[in-house]
Every structure is written in structure tokens, then in C-alpha cells.
Amino acid sequence: MNVGLFGGTFDPIHRGHLAVARAARERFDLGRILFVPASIPPHKRDLNITPYAHRYAMVSLAVSGEKMFIPSDIESPEQLGDTPSYSIDTVKRMKKQLKKADRLFFLIGMDAFQDIAKWREPEALLKETDFIVMARPGYSLADVGDSLPEKLRPDPRVSKALKAQPATGDIVLPGATLHLLSETHEKISATQIRAAARSGSKLDSLVGPAVAEYIRKTGLYKVSPGKADPDTTAPTKHSSHTQNSRRKEK
């Protein structure tokens, strides 16, 4: 079985995340997609993030209507304690839970993938699992190649030739297999949703009725956080990441 691992802060999960998961499921015949909320994202430790229990609850509500979408607590505080959620560790632990015949795919947005070389053990991570990269209009194959760890990057002459080619198709390299998914470009961001919640706007069209009701009943996002985290499903090529949000995944 092909299994997808879709990790993130999910603060909150929204229709854009689900649209991406559906597109990946259809294109790569994923029998299951595991949604993994991060307990302590390494690159967002100094941001004001909603407690894990709320984010996991919202993920569970959002995916409850789709039997192939499963919430996973593999990065929960109960399992990790105060340790940050490192993708290489999560992937290795996840693979131990799968059958030998299963094939794991790691879903990631292009904005996040551009920092992959700064993550913990990036070369090992890319060898452990296929990556499904959710590209967007305006990105080229050169953008994808230049984001790889230095040892895996294409020659500068090759990269220059790839600038004219959109980020589509599959890239198979020694030590990395990337599948570029460009079927969906949802114009929804977690920052937008939190702002809407603070203003009392209706959220059903952004997060779905169940998550909207949960946010309303719990009063989440009524108080503006100190800093807003970037959202990997935002529509623009150059998102307004802060320096803190682009920190190395140590």
C-alpha cells in the first residue's frame, strides 16, 4: 500500500490541506494519508502556537468524513515529551509501524521544501521516503533542484537550463525521489483563518463546519498571537516568512 505522511502545525487545519491531500491520494494511489500535527515544530519554537490537544482535535474532526485520512499522534507530547518534532525521526518511526510492502510518501509544500537543506539530516530524510512536493505557479524545476542539500543539487549549468521549465513531473536522483504535485492551489492560509476567527467572521467555507464549530465553542484565536506562523498552502510564490519561521530544523 502507498501511504502518505502529511505533517504540519495545522493551526488550524483547513480546506486547503484537505484539497492537497485529496489530489495526492488520487495521483499517487495513496491507500492512507496520516495527518501528523507537530507537538513542538523545530522551526516555530518561539511562536505562539495553539496547544497540541486543540490542533489534534481539529485534525480529527476535519478528516472524520474520509476513511482514508487518519489523524496520527506520533508527534504528540505523550510520545515525544518536550522533544521537538524532527521529520527524520518521525519518518523512521512511522516506517517501523508499516508493513514491509508499504511505500511511504512525505507530503510537503514548496515553501517548506525550499528549506529542506536546513532540516536535520536532510540527505538521510530524502533517502528514507519519496517526497510529494506541492508546487505552485511561478516555481521552476530549478527552484526545486536548488532547494536540495548541496550534495544532491544539479550542476549550476543544468540548473540554469531548468529555470524555464515549470515544477511538474517526477525527479529521480541518486538519493532522492521527488514527485511534483501542481493540481491544487487553494487560496487559504491559517493566518487568514485566525484573523477571521478573531473578527467573528464565519469560518465554514475555510475550515468546514465541524472545525468551525470547534473554534467557535472553544474560543480559539480570539486573542491575537504574538507572531503568526507561515502556512505551507498559501498561494503566493514568495510568502512573508519571518526569519524565525525559516530557522534551521535542528
Image: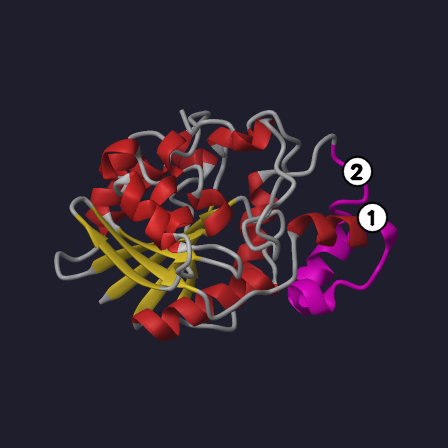
Indicate yes or no whether the magenta region holds residue 36: no
The front one of 6 and 69 is 6
The front one of 54 and 227 is 227
User: Quarter holding the C terminus?
Assistant: top left
| Residue under pointer 1 | 198
User: Quarter holding the N terminus?
Assistant: bottom left
Disc 1 element: helix
Q: Amino acid at mark 1?
A: Arg
The front one of 10 and 135 is 135
Q: Residue furthest right?
A: 199
Is 28 left or right of 41, judged from the image as shown?
left
Is 62 left or right of 66, judged from the image as shown?
right
Color encoding of the figure? secondary structure
Q: Residue 36, can we see it?
A: no
Name which residue lies at 78% across and 49% down: 195
Q: Which image quadrant for residue 204?
A: bottom right
Q: Which circle marks residue 36 in the picture? A: none
> Residue 126, percent across and down?
26, 43
Which span of residues is magenta-colored? 197-225
Q: Amino acid at mark 2?
A: Ser
Asked if the residues shown at circle 2 and circle 1 are in contact, with their CB atoms under 8 angstroms apart, the answer is yes
| Residue under pointer 2 | 224
